[in-house]
Each structure stands twice: as structure tokens, then as C-alpha cells.
Image: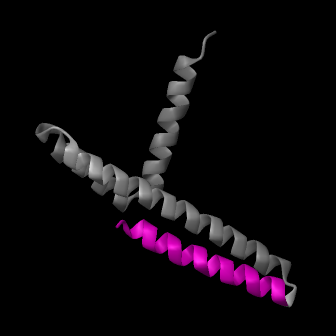
Amino acid sequence: MANQRIEGAIEEFEGKAQRGVGRMVGDSKLQVDGAIKEVSGRAKNAYGRVIDGLDGMVDKAPADLRDPARKGLDFARRKPLLTTGIIAGAAVLLGALGRKR
């Protein structure tokens, strides 16, 4: 299981608790901060699920591609924000290239 899944679950739980306390004491800032933390935790958990799924696919890849794929996954585990940015940038570029003029 990816560390992001564990961290995400903890952060999501903390956010829910923070939001609940904010609701009990009538502190809207605490509620908003809790909601943001909860969403951030869900995102980390989802990222971890994707990494875990890709890890299973690496085992099924042809032997000559396993090592580079594992290096890519290790990079994604160490630098999740950078990986997300790279993927988003590639998606924007591919979308722009695929657009008809």
C-alpha cells in the first residue's frame, strides 16, 4: 500500500474531525479549513490507489520494460506533486495538439 493512501486517510479523518469541531463551536474558518484538509486527504488517497494499481501492472509488463517502469513509479512515490504537474502538462499539450483548427 502506498504511503499516500495512509497519509490521505489520516488527513481525511483529521479534516472531518476539524470540520465537526468547527460546526459544534460555530467557527466557520475551522469548518472551511477542515473541509480543505478532508479534500486534500481524499486526493492523496486517490493518488495512492492509482500508484498501487500501476504497481500491479508493472508486474505484468514485458520483462524489458519492468525496470524503467519501476523507476518511474519510484519517482512518482517520492515526488507526487511534480508527477501530477507533469501529467497535467502533458494532458494540456496533447489536448492542444489534438484540437482541430
Q: Residue at x 28, y 52 (%)?
A: 56
Judge left or right: residue 26 versus residue 35.
right
- Compared with 90, 40 (above or below) is below
Please identify the residue farthest to the left as the structure is shown. 63
Q: Residue at x 78, y 77 (%)?
A: 31
Residue 1 falls in image quadrant: bottom left
For the C terminus, the image quarter is: top right
Question: In x, y percent, where is residue 24?
Answer: 82, 88
Please identify the residue farthest to the right as the structure is shown. 26
Q: Is residue 78 magenta?
A: no
Question: In x, y percent, where is residue 30?
Answer: 77, 80
- Compared with 13, 44 (above or below) is above
- Colour approach in the figure: one colour
Count of residue discs = 0
Magenta stretch: dominant secondary structure: helix
Q: Which residues are magenta?
A: 1-24
Q: Residue at x 59, y 73 (%)?
A: 12
* Depth check, front residue: 85 or 7: 7
- Compared with 6, 88 (above or below) is above
Question: In x, y percent, where is residue 6?
Answer: 44, 73
Residue 51 falls in image quadrant: bottom left
Please identify the residue farthest to the top as the structure is shown. 101
- Compared with 23, 54 (above or below) is above
Question: In x, y percent, where is residue 41?
Answer: 56, 68
Please identify the residue farthest to the bottom as the structure is shown. 25
Residue 32 falls in image quadrant: bottom right
Q: Residue at x 52, y 78 (%)?
A: 10
Q: Is residue 23 magenta?
A: yes
